[in-house]
Image (cartoon, helix red, strand yellow):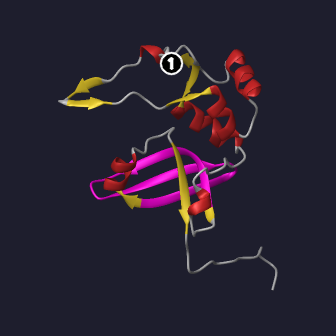
C-alpha cells in the first residue's frame, strides 16, 4: 500500500475527491476489539498496512481496516453518543460497503460479529460522509421483531 501521508485531495472532472479515511492505531484497535499492540503486530507482520499522518503518527486506511473487520468478526465497539438516545439497539462499527444510485443507497456495516445492512437515501449518505472505512452507528428502532427457530422443531 502506498504511504498514506502522500495521499492528497485531487481534482477529477471538476470535483475534488477527499483523502481516504485514516484511523490511528488506537482507534483501529478499539473498533476491532483488540489491543493497540495487536494492531502494531499485524502491521509489523504485514497483515495490515500502515502509513504516517501529518503529525507523524501511524495510521491505517479505513477501507483496509473494514476488510479486516469483516474477516475477524470483531467485537462491537462502544457508541459514545448512546446515553442520550431512546433507541436501545445500536451497533457501532465500520462501513464495509456503499452502493448508491441517484435516490437510494445500501450501506453495509461490520459491527463486531454483526453485519448490518441499511437502506437510506443517497442524500443522507453524502450528508453523513459515509464511505468504506468510515465509522458509523446503526440505530435500530422497530415495532416488529420476527423470531425463528431451527427447522424440525415445532
Residue closest to the eye, 20 or 83: 83
Examine the image and state in which quarter residue 30 appears.
Answer: top right
Task: Residue 89 in the image: state x and y as whole percent.
Answer: 62, 65
The extreme bottom residue here reads 154
Q: Is 42 positioned to the left or the right of 12 in the image?
A: right
Q: Reply above or below: 90 against 148.
A: above
Residue 117 lies in the magenta stretch? yes
Q: Reply above or below: 128 against 21.
A: below
Q: Is 21 positioned to the left or the right of 146 in the image?
A: left
Q: Main secondary structure of the magenta part?
A: strand
Callout 1 crowding tier (Cα within 10 Å): few <14, some 14–19, many ≥20: some
Q: Reply above or below: 40 against 62.
A: above
The extreme right residue here reads 153
Task: Residue 37 in the image: state x and y as whole percent.
Answer: 76, 24
Residue 101 lies in the magenta stretch? yes
Q: Reply above or below: 18 against 108.
A: above
Residue at coordinates 63% horizontally, 42% vertically from top-left?
70
The extreme front residue here reads 84
Task: Residue 88 in the image: state x and y as whole percent.
Answer: 63, 67
Q: Is 100 positioned to the left or the right of 74 in the image?
A: left
Residue range (magenta): 90-119
Asked which secondary structure carries label 1, the reply is: loop
Residue at coordinates 60% horizontally, 48% vertically from top-left?
110
Quarter of the picture holding the C terminus: bottom right
Residue that badge 1 annotates:
53
Task: Residue 129 in the image: state x and y as whole percent.
Answer: 39, 44
Q: Is 10 positioned to the left or the right of 90 in the image?
A: left
Amino acid at each position: 500500500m502506498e504511504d498514506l501521508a502522500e495521499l492528497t485531495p485531487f481534482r477529477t472532472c471538476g470535483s475534488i475527491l477527499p483523502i481516504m479515511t485514516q484511523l490511528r492505531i488506537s482507534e483501529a484497535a478499539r473498533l476491532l476489539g483488540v489491543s493497540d499492540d495487536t494492531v502494531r503486530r499485524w502491521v509489523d507482520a504485514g497483515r495490515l498496512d500502515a502509513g504516517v499522518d501529518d503529525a507523524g503518527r501511524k495510521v491505517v486506511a479505513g477501507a483496509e481496516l473494514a476488510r479486516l473487520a469483516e474477516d475477524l468478526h470483531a467485537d462491537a465497539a462502544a457508541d459514545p453518543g448512546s446515553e442520550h438516545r431512546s433507541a436501545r439497539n445500536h451497533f457501532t462499527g465500520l462501513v464495509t460497503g456503499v452502493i448508491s444510485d441517484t435516490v437510494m443507497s445500501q450501506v453495509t456495516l461490520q459491527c463486531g460479529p454483526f453485519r448490518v445492512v441499511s437502506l437510506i437515501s443517497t442524500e443522507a449518505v453524502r450528508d453523513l460522509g459515509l464511505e468504506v472505512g468510515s465509522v458509523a452507528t446503526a440505530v435500530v428502532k422497530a415495532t416488529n421483531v420476527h423470531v425463528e427457530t431451527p427447522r424440525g422443531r415445532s
